[in-house]
Image (cartoon, helix red, strand yellow):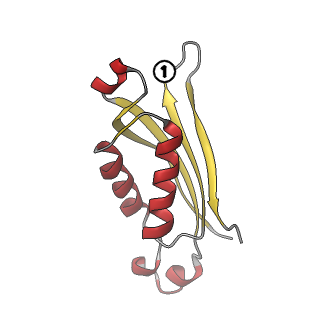
Amino acid sequence: MDIVFINQLTVETTIGAYDWEKTIKQTLKIDLEMAWDNKAPALNDDLTKALDYATVSERITTWLSEQKIELIETVAERIAAMLLEEFKIQWLKLTIHKPDAVANAQAVGVCIERGEKR
């Protein structure tokens, strides 16, 4: 299985369950691994057959910057569902970090895997 990855994609969004969090933007950092057959794009050096990480990054950034969600778990599930459907990815591993959310921790967050790993 080949993997296309994005590490530490940084997005500003409204995230949090507390009233004060609903009035500010906070930073989320996203790590993403996606299963993709890289043989076809590599054969003819063809971007149209590749999983374009720039397009995926832009889609996540645009979507997330427009949201107001309370739970990081919700963010993870919705991004995963969107990517699986829109980009026809078979499997992905998604980690979302919320820096500075907890004193004395660099970040907190969630990590999920969705789809079928082949």
Left or right for 103, reference 68: right
Q: Amino acid at mark 1?
A: Asp
Does 13 sit above or below residue 113? above
Most foreground residue, 7 or 75: 75
x, y (%) of residue 114? 62, 59
Residue at (54% x, 52% y) in the render: 32
x, y (%) of residue 28? 44, 36
Residue extending farthest top: 103
Instruction: Tell me if mark 1 has few (under 14), some (14-19) or many (20+) residues whose alpha carbon lies within 10 angstroms of its own.
Output: few
For the N terminus, the image quarter is bottom right
Does 69 sit above or below residue 1? above
For the C terminus, the image quarter is bottom right
Question: Which residue bears the numbered disc 1?
Answer: 100
x, y (%) of residue 8? 49, 42
Residue at (33% x, 51% y) in the render: 63
Q: Which of the 4 image quarters holds residue 65?
A: top left
